[in-house]
């Protein structure tokens, strides 16, 4: 039945449109970043990815990452969101690790997965997400690298210099 095939395609397109709309809404409106901080938002992202795609997505980081600048927090969140969603949707990952660490005067956000790994040549559609992540990193003065993980999968690493950082407070 050719109609069934066309109906399946239509349903898939509608579902992709709904996903895109949800992601846009989440990206532009992230009140949790204002109210409770980046770690709470990333924990929520990991839970959402786990539930939505029925995979294991875990956030590792300190309970409180005091990024006070909401624009910086939002860009870091969007980078993690794009990388984790790509791993779940396109890389057939079963495990995704979202990790935030502070090494001296540098905050490091790393999203790693055990999926098929980043292809050597990206299609335009996949390349758009990567360009958006790089643009978001550039907006906050961070660097972003996306490469094959050791063995299997991909790791996206965003590094941000922390100005005048002390143990108890990160003023970004």
Image: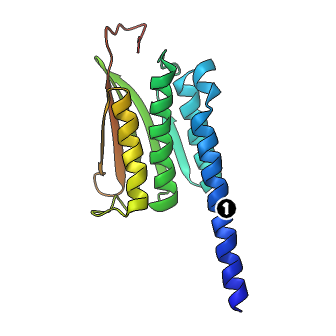
Tell me which residue sits at (36%, 56%) in the image.
Answer: 153
The image shows residue 14 at horizontal and vertical percentages of: 68, 64
Determine whether, in the image, residue 73 is placed left or right of residue 130: right
Determine whether, in the image, residue 116 is placed left or right of residue 44: left
The image shows residue 51 at horizontal and vertical percentages of: 65, 49
Q: Quadrant of the N terminus?
A: bottom right
Judging depth in this view, the residue of 150 and 36 nearest the camera is 36
Tell me which residue sits at (56%, 21%) in the image.
Answer: 37
| Residue position for label 1 | 15
The colour scheme is rainbow
The image shows residue 106 at horizontal and vertical percentages of: 30, 22
- Answer with the quarter of the image where residue 33 lies: top right
Determine whether, in the image, residue 171 is placed left or right of residue 103: right
Residue at the outermost bottom position: 1
Tell me which residue sits at (51%, 55%) in the image.
Answer: 88
The image shows residue 35 at horizontal and vertical percentages of: 63, 19
Q: Is residue 82 above or below residue 3?
A: above
Is there any visible trace of residue 113 in the rendered image?
Answer: no
Tell me which residue sits at (32%, 29%) in the image.
Answer: 142
Is there any visible trace of residue 107 in the rendered image?
Answer: yes
Q: Is residue 85 above or below residue 62?
A: below
Q: Quadrant of the C terminus?
A: top left
- Answer with the quarter of the image where residue 114 lies: bottom left
Please tell me how crowded label 1 is: few (under 14), some (14-19), or many (20+) other residues with Cα within 10 Å: few
Q: Is residue 49 above or below residue 165?
A: below
Q: In terms of secondary structure, where does tag 1 sit?
A: helix
Judging depth in this view, the residue of 39 and 55 nearest the camera is 39
How many numbered marks does the figure carry?
1
């Amino acid at each position: 039945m050719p109609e069934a095939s066309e109906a399946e395609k239509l349903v898939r397109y509608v579902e992709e449109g709904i996903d895109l709309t949800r992601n846009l809404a989440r990206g532009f409106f992230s009140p949790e970043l204002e109210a409770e901080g980046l770690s709470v938002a990333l924990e929520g992202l990991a839970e959402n990815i786990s539930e939505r795609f029925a995979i294991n997505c875990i956030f590792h980081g300190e309970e409180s990452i005091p990024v006070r600048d909401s624009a910086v927090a939002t860009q870091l969140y969007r980078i993690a969101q794009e990388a984790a969603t790509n791993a779940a949707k396109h890389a057939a990952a079963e495990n995704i690790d979202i990790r935030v660490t502070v090494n001296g005067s540098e905050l490091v956000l790393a999203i790693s997965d055990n999926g098929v790994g980043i292809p050597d040549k990206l299609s335009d559609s996949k390349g758009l997400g990567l360009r958006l992540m790089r643009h978001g990193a550039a907006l906050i003065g961070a660097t972003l690298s996306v490469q094959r993980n050791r063995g299997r999968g991909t790791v996206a690493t965003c590094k941000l210099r922390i100005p005048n950082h002390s143990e108890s407070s990160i003023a970004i």
